[in-house]
Every structure is written in structure tokens, then in C-alpha cells.
Image (cartoon, rainbow, N blue to C red):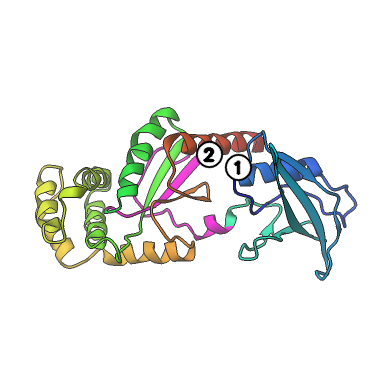
């Protein structure tokens, strides 16, 4: 069970005239940390924070069966900011905004391959590696299972994140797939599927030839594609995605951002549960 950052939507600080809203505090904690209903959450009254002027300390006890865990959160006097006290590497957040806004501000989805309704309530951004076996296992979940289970509710965006140190043809595959996208955006998802379907047969030496042969059967100009691949015309696009992943502390693939919530690749049931949390949260917001 993970205990981490907390953001309280609409929470009023103890230093303000309105009372501290424990129910709102608990509700947002459950949303942010994906706490199961069976997890008990006990929120204390705010008290002056020792050694942190202008902040109050809020103690939280989480319980599950016979286990318990204590967390500390620091709330600014103006009721705007919360700092998780037990996870020093996690930045503070504005209480009145989206708890994942820092991630959303760094994610650039324009100009990226995507499928699903543009106005879907849930957007999943995948940082993936076309040579990655775990990404291959995740692909059917993102491409078929989840869209079929939640029709019209999910949009999927792909960002290149080749792990060059362990996957010798991943960068070349990312460049080639980007070349396909430049020529025919709809064909990108066909080549995305093709790479995973043929992952075991691809090598650094045969990748380009296989790509050119694939192009002729999939409505992509093979001459134009070959020129794009040989000149590395799309490599700058891949480099931007890698740099973006670095700013988001992506360290492995697949890494997903679900409405900004960062998670590692998960199976269909878990992903569907997280999507349902987002759908329920969006419904409450309206």
C-alpha cells in the first residue's frame, strides 16, 4: 500500500476563519493515494508546526486490518499549500488546484500520436519503448481492452522513451515510427502494433529493411519513409520526448500518466480501477 502526497481541494486552513474540513481532507487523501474503502483514515486537528513558521501540522493515521501507518502533513497559514512531511523529495502543492498539476504542466500532448475522443474525461499518456517487453504486454490493455471497456471515455497519447542502454534498436524504432507519424498519423498505431507483434524478429541490422517492407503494405510511401529514416529527420522529435520524460522523472517503461497521475505499467484490472477513480472524481467535480 502506498502512502504519499496529499492535496486538499477547497480545504480551508486552520489559520482562516472557516473550520478545518476533515472530511474534505480525507476525501482528497483517498483520491490522491488511491486508498481502498477498507483503509481507515483518522485526521487530527491542526496544531502549530515546530520549526516551520507559517504552517500547521496535520497528523494522519492510516489503518488497514491490524496494520497502521502515521503520516504528517504541513498546511500553510493561508490554506493554499500542503507539504508531505514524510516524503521530503515530493514538492508542495497548491491546495486549490489539481494535485497532479505539476505533471500536467510538463506533459506536451500536441503533435503526439493519440487515439480516442479529444474531449475524453481521462487522458493516458504513455512513455514507451518499442523494444520493451513490458510495453508489449501493456499494449493490448491500452489499445483494445481499456477502450472497449470504457468506450469514448479514454484518450491515449504515446511519447517515445527508448531505453538505449539496454535496448539496442529502441531509438532507431522510435525514429522510424515517428517518420511514419509524420507521413501518415493514422498509420502510427499500425506500426506501433507491428513493432510489438514482431519484437522478437527485429534486430538493429534488419529494422530498416523490415520497416520499408512494412510501409508498402500499409499505405505509407516506402521511398519517403526510407529517406526520413536514413537522414534521422524525426530524431529531434524523439529527443524532445526523452527530455520531457526526464523532467517528469521517468526512469522505466511503460510509465503512464493518467490525468497527470504517474504510475508504472499495470495490468488491465488495476488500470480500469484507476480510470474509474478518475471518472468518479470528474463526475463529483461537476
Q: Is residue 116 magenta?
A: yes
Q: Secondary structure at mark 1?
A: loop
Q: Is residue 174 magenta?
A: no
> In this picture, is 176 found above or below 272?
below
Mark 1, other Cα within 10 Å: few <14 / some 14–19 / many ≥20: some
Decide which of tag 1 and tag 2 comes sooner along the chain. 1
Residue visible at 17% across and 62% down in the picture: 229
Task: Residue 40: give x, y in percent of width and height.
Answer: 72, 38
Residue visible at 90% across and 52% down in the picture: 17
- Residue 8 is tagged as none
Q: Which residue is mark 2?
A: 274
Magenta segment boundaries in residue numbering: 102-130
The residue closer to the viewer here, 234 or 26, is 26
Relative to 196, is 99 on the left or the right? Answer: right
Q: Are marks 1 and 2 in contact (CB under 8 Å)?
A: yes
Q: Secondary structure at mark 2?
A: helix
- Which quadrant, please, contains the C terminus? top right
- Which quadrant, please, contains the N terminus? top right
- Residue 34 is tagged as 1
What is the residue that sits farthest to the front in this orientation?
Answer: 66
The residue closer to the viewer here, 160 or 45, is 45
Mark 2, other Cα within 10 Å: few <14 / some 14–19 / many ≥20: some
Task: Residue 207: give x, y in percent of width and height.
Answer: 14, 56
Residue visible at 15% across and 48% down in the picture: 220
Residue visible at 83% across and 64% down in the picture: 49
CA–CA distance between discs 1 and 2? 8 Å
Amino acid at each position: 500500500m502506498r502512502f504519499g502526497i496529499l492535496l486538499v481541494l477547497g480545504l480551508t486552513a486552520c489559520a482562516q476563519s472557516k473550520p478545518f474540513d476533515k472530511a474534505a481532507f480525507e476525501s482528497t487523501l483517498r483520491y490522491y493515494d488511491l486508498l481502498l474503502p477498507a483503509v481507515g483514515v483518522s485526521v487530527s486537528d491542526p496544531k502549530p508546526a515546530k520549526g516551520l513558521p507559517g504552517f500547521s501540522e496535520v497528523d494522519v493515521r492510516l489503518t488497514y486490518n491490524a496494520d497502521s501507518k502515521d503520516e504528517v502533513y504541513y498546511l500553510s497559514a493561508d490554506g493554499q499549500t500542503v507539504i508531505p512531511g514524510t516524503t521530503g523529495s515530493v514538492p508542495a502543492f497548491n491546495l486549490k488546484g489539481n494535485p497532479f498539476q505539476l505533471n500536467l504542466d510538463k506533459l506536451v500532448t500536441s503533435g503526439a500520436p493519440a487515439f480516442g475522443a479529444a474531449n475524453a474525461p481521462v487522458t493516458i499518456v504513455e512513455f514507451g519503448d518499442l523494444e520493451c517487453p513490458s510495453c508489449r504486454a501493456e499494449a493490448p490493455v491500452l489499445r483494445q481492452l481499456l477502450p472497449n471497456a470504457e468506450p469514448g471515455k479514454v484518450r491515449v497519447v504515446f511519447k517515445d522513451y527508448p531505453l538505449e542502454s539496454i535496448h539496442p534498436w529502441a531509438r532507431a524504432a522510435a525514429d522510424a515510427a515517428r517518420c511514419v507519424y509524420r507521413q501518415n498519423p493514422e498509420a502510427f498505431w499500425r506500426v506501433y502494433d507491428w513493432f510489438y507483434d514482431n519484437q522478437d524478429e527485429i534486430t538493429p541490422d534488419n529494422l530498416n529493411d523490415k520497416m520499408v517492407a512494412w510501409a508498402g503494405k500499409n499505405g505509407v510511401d516506402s521511398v519517403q519513409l526510407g529517406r526520413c529514416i536514413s537522414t534521422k529527420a524525426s530524431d529531434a522529435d524523439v529527443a524532445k520526448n526523452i527530455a520531457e520524460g526526464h523532467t517528469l522523472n521517468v526512469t522505466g517503461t511503460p510509465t503512464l500518466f493518467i490525468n497527470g497521475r504517474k504510475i508504472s505499467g499495470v495490468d488491465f484490472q488495476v488500470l480500469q480501477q484507476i480510470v474509474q477513480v478518475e471518472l468518479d472524481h470528474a463526475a463529483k467535480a461537476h
